Image: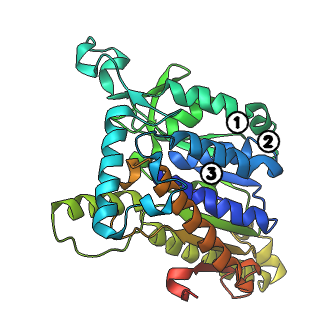
């Protein structure tokens, strides 16, 4: 499971996971960036039968807001129409800016510019101590480090600018590693790990696909890539739409371009494997052939794209609009997108083409 960053949109990923769990599909590797890192920790850090419940607990806690919970359980009170909903979402996002999100982040007091230059408190608008407590309560880090499910989260070293993955094959994972992956400046402060400071991995790449294909064992692979930002969109008509479209382009991380590049590489590996099989014995045993054989294989890869598509009333603040109403909508959308995807039997079948590679995307293959 590959989980992109996207803040409040992350409950879409939780809905996708619920549908996969119902289909008895449990990942043996989860990789995430930012909010995707938090969802990954909730999945890898709990036994399969408890994962959906822990995801639900997290998302209900961070979207608990007495100012906006009046929409829950009273359908007649829910905002009707795009204009009313847009106003509701803007007010909810404004509340998050001023008050933070329960169990996640809160406005720094005193404010950043009241702290001395060089202090970590002077570098962000919010503090994330609440998130550390939430992760410690909902995630079993001993379970993550037992490596039953491989776990990877991406972050950026603030000093070097290098992209770093904290992975259970190389690191002992703690809450700080998950928090580092989601520390998007200047909202959140950098997180210190072993004397170095890290920011949100989405600053460089918001999708962990490259890490998985480059650093995983070459084996038959079924990957569910759950993206929260759509690379394609409409031409903006005003400044608010420009801000939203800019975020979508920035954080979609050229998802399909990366997939197409991997398809080409895998096609070359398959072609090379077939070629080596037809070499005469003397050439097959040559030093050059042995070197090339390390890159050749007949492994098969399927990448299933599940991408959240914004509604008309969602604006540029959709990634920090933490209302329970929106959370439930995102969750349901992810669940139903995954259910529709799994109705297609070819999704779970092993690719049989010469490339040994296939992608599936409802946006391309047609919605029901």
Coordinates of residue 300 in the picture (x, y in percent): 73, 75
Which residue in the rendered view is the most extreme toward the left?
Answer: 238
**Rendering colour mode:** rainbow
Q: Is residue 173 above or below residue 284?
A: above
Q: Which residue corresponds to mark 3?
A: 31
As displayed, is residue 112 above or below residue 153? Answer: above
Point out residue 164 in the picture as x, y percentages from the top left corner: 52, 40
Q: Which mark is residue 147?
A: 2
Secondary structure under the numbered disc 3 in the rendered image: strand
Separation of marks 1 and 3 at Cα, in angstroms: 16 Å
Is any atom of residue 174 visible in this view? no
Q: Where residue 187 sits in the image (x, y, percent)?
A: 35, 35
Q: Residues within 10 Å of mark 1 (few under 14, many from 20)?
A: many
How dense is the environment of label 2, judged by Cα within 10 Å: few (below 14), some, or many (20 and up)? some
119 vs 237: above or below: above
Instruction: Examine the rendered structure and indicate whether residue 237 appears above or below residue 47.
Output: below
Confirm whether residue 52 shows in the render. Answer: yes
Dot placed on the residue nearer the N-terminal end, 2 or 1: 1
Residue named by callout 1: 139
């Amino acid at each position: 499971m590959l989980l992109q960053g996207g803040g409040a949109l992350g409950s879409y990923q939780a809905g996708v996971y619920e549908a996969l769990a119902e289909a008895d599909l449990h990942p043996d590797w989860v990789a995430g960036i930012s909010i995707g890192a938090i969802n990954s920790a909730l999945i890898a850090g709990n036994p399969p039968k408890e994962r959906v419940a822990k995801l639900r607990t997290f998302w209900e806690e961070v979207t608990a807001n007495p100012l906006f919970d009046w929409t829950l359980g009273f359908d007649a009170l829910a905002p009707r129409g795009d204009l009313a909903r847009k106003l509701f979402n803007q007010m909810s996002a404004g509340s998050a800016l001023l008050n933070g999100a329960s169990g996640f982040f809160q406005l720094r007091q005193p404010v950043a510019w009241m702290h001395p230059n060089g202090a970590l408190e002077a570098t962000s608008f919010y503090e994330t101590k609440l998130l550390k407590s939430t992760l410690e309560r909902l995630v079993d880090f001993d379970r993550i480090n037992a490596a039953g499910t491989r776990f990877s989260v991406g972050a950026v070293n603030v000093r070097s600018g290098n992209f770093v993955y904290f992975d259970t094959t190389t690191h002992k994972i703690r809450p700080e590693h998950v928090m580092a992956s989601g520390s998007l400046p200047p909202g959140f402060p950098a997180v210190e790990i072993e004397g170095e400071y890290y920011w949100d991995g989405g600053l460089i790449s918001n999708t962990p696909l490259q890490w998985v294909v480059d650093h995983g064992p070459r084996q038959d692979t079924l990957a569910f890539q759950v993206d929260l930002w759509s690379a394609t969109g409409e031409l903006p008509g005003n400044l608010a739409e420009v801000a939203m479209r800019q975020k979508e382009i920035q954080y979609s991380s050229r998802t399909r371009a990366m997939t197409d590049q991997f398809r080409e590489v895998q096609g070359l590996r398959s072609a090379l494997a077939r070629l080596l099989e037809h070499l005469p014995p003397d050439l097959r045993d040559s030093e050059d052939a042995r070197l090339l054989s390390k890159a050749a294989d007949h492994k098969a890869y399927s990448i299933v794209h599940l991408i959240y598509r914004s509604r008309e009333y969602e604006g540029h603040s959709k990634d920090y609009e933490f209302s329970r109403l929106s959370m439930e909508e995102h969750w349901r959308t992810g669940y139903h997108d995954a259910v529709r995807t799994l109705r297609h039997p070819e999704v779970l079948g092993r690719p049989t083409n010469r490339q040994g590679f296939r992608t599936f995307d409802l946006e391309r293959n047609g919605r029901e």
